[in-house]
Structures are given as C-alpha cells and as structure tokens.
Image (cartoon, helix red, strand yellow):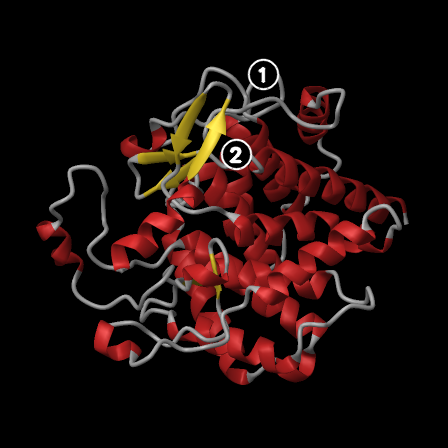
Amino acid sequence: MKLEKSWEKLPLYLWEDDDEILMQGFTNTYTWDCGFYLQAIGKDAIDPDLKPLALKTRKFLLDNQVMTELKNPFKYHRLPRAGGWTFSYLDNGWVVSDCTAEAVKALLETEGLGDEPLSDERIKKAVSFIMLLQGKDGGWTSVDKAIGSPKLEWFNAANVFVDIMVDHSYVECTASIIQCFAQIKQSRPHLFTSEMENAMERAVKYLLKSQYKDGSWEALWGLCFTYGICFVVEGLTMYGMSKDHKAIQRACTYLWSKQKEDGGWGEAQESALAREYIQADASVVDQTAWCILALLNGGYAEDPRLIKAIEWLIDQQLEDGDWPVQPMSGLFYKTTMVSYRNYKRYFSLLALKKYKEEQIKESI
C-alpha cells in the first residue's frame, strides 16, 4: 500500500523539457515562489490588472499553511509544525522557517484586497513555530532545532552533501525571520511581543558575529555571498539599523569590489566549494538583482555605479517582459546547484520597484 501511494506521487517529480522528461529533486517550489511573487506585486496588488493574480496567490498561501499536528510527532523526532509553511505545498507537511517567514511577509504586505485576511491566530501560530527553531547562537535553522554537536558531521556518510547531520543556523533564514517579525511589528503591532523583540536582538548579534572580515556573509541555500548579503542587509535595515552602520557599509564595499565592468554581478558556482567569491564569466540577472537590493538598502540609490547596474538589468529584459535563461544560482548544502527559474523574474522586479521607490523618496 505504501509503495502504491509513493508511485501515485511520482508524476509530481517529473516535468517535460523540450524533447525529454526530467526528474526534479523536490515536488515543487510553490510556496517559496508564491511568497516572493506576492511581495514583488506588493502595493500594486490593488491595480485592476494585478488584483486577480494577487488574490489567487494569497488564497494559495492561506490554503497551504499547515494547521494540524502530526500524530505523536516526538515519537518520530519531529517538532510541532502547526503554523508553518512548507517549501512546496500543504501535503508535503515539512515546515520550513524562512518559507514561513516569507509567506507571512507576503500576506501582510498585500492586505486590504477584500479577501480573507491573515488572522491574528494564524500569525501567532506561525510565530510559535518559528520561535522553536532559534538556536542558542541566536540564529535560525531551516527545519529542525540545532541539536547535537557539529562533530556529528564526522559521521556524514554522504559522498555528495556537506553538513547534513544536524541542522545549523543560516544567515539567510535568520534574516528572513527578522524581516518577518519587523513586518508583524509594523502591520499588527498588538501581536509583537517582548519575546519576539528579544529573539530579534539575539538574531542581530548572531548576524553581526557571522560577518566575515572582508564584509561579506556566506549563505547556504543560494549562491553564496551575493545571496547572503542581500538577505542580511535587508534584515538589518528592517530591524532598524542605520544604513550607515559599519557592518552594512562593509558589506556594500564588498559588493562594489565585485561589480563587473558592464554594471552587473556574476558569482561563479565554484564559490560554493571554494568558500570564497569567484567571478563568473558573465553577469547574472538574479545575482545582480540581489546586489541592487542590498546596495539600495545601504543608501546607494543615487550612486552612478548603482544606476549602471539598473541599466544593465533593464537591458537584459526580453520583449515579452521575461528575462533570458540564467545560470543556476540556487544551492543545496554547498555542493549541488539548484535551478530556480523564477528567481530572475521576481527578484528583478523587487530590485526595480525598490529603485523606483527610492527615487521617489529622494524627490520629496
């Protein structure tokens, strides 16, 4: 019976690409993508042309919050899961810290469309789940508590993946959750607690301690330094840290040092194993968008180098509004590249929208 059920789900992993059938390593990226697409729509969700799309996306996220517990989860060494969102959709059942944070952010940022709101009770459940995963170091893990010694990695029997024996704190997950809590504080201040404030303070200390001497932050779920810096700088600024803070400015200086002659950024896939920034042969759309977002948060909206990056990003856009196929920028445990085909779309839109917003601020 279990084999039959597994076989029924096999088509979820298969997809056609031109003249061949390929198999993906996970069912889908629905929740993760919907969260960022909805954030990219943002305040424009009230536009008549975008509202139907925004409403459908909101409904998907609302319908796919996990609200039930497993039967006897501790028997199977599983944490409580109610309130979280998975990477894909409800049936997956495996809730993730930053997927939850980005979903909450997206739903709060697009409120007021006349549909079902994200209730206070749902937010409380989401926060309760997130709080379970904060480690002693102040950082947040992805799916499990940081239990056990890092020395357990000595027993890693996999020939492919690195650091898989225990869940670790990740700068990008931590930054997403800081952003989420800051959004809750802004949108639903009556739900923001002293426990959340204390958790954010610990998380910020973790991020500052995790910054490398050269000013960078290294991510694990995206390639590598451009991805990490993008999330962390936004997290720190949403927390309330001044853009002039030395940690933020050191990160911006690091990014400027990696900008290519054409105005874009391109981090090679080899950076993951080398644990240092290696230049790609050409600039990459989603990585350039990440750097633009970080530098805008760092206060460089009027910098000619930033404007050159914006111009490069716009020049890459195709006639139909899309961007061309890009090298893979997703990462899985430092060794495996992951294709996120939507990154070039919503991160580019987020970067261009934020640049426009900063221009408006400057003109007031």
Residue 157, position as x, y percentages in the image? 11, 46
Residue 58, position as x, y percentages in the image? 68, 60
Above or below, 20 against 114 in this view is: above
User: What quarter of the picture does the N terminus occupy?
Assistant: bottom left
> Amino acid under label 2?
Leu
Number of numbered markers: 2
| Left or right of 260 in this view: 214 | left
Q: Which of the 4 quarters of the picture holds residue 130?
A: bottom left
Report the Cα–Cα distance between label 1 and label 2: 13 Å
Mark sitting earlier along the chain (1/2): 2
The residue that label 1 is drawn on is: 261
Q: Which of the 4 quarters of the picture holds residue 348?
A: top right
Above or below, 156 against 208 in this view is: above
At x 52%, y 58%, the residue is 176
At x 16%, y 63%, the residue is 149
* Front-lying residue, 301 or 332: 332
* Number of residues whose C-alpha sits closer than 10 Å to that of mark 2, classed few (under 14), some (14–19) or many (20 or more): many
Q: Which of the 4 quarters of the picture holds residue 313?
A: top right
The residue that label 2 is drawn on is: 255
> Amino acid under label 1?
Glu
Local SS, label 2 = helix
At x 46%, y 45%, the residue is 228
Q: Is residue 239 visible?
A: no
Local SS, label 1 = loop
Q: Is residue 109 visible?
A: yes
* Front-lying residue, 16 or 355: 16
* Number of residues whose C-alpha sits closer than 10 Å to that of mark 1, classed few (under 14), some (14–19) or many (20 or more): few
Residue 299, position as x, y percentages in the image? 68, 45
Residue 146, position as x, y percentages in the image? 28, 66
Q: Residue furthest left?
A: 155
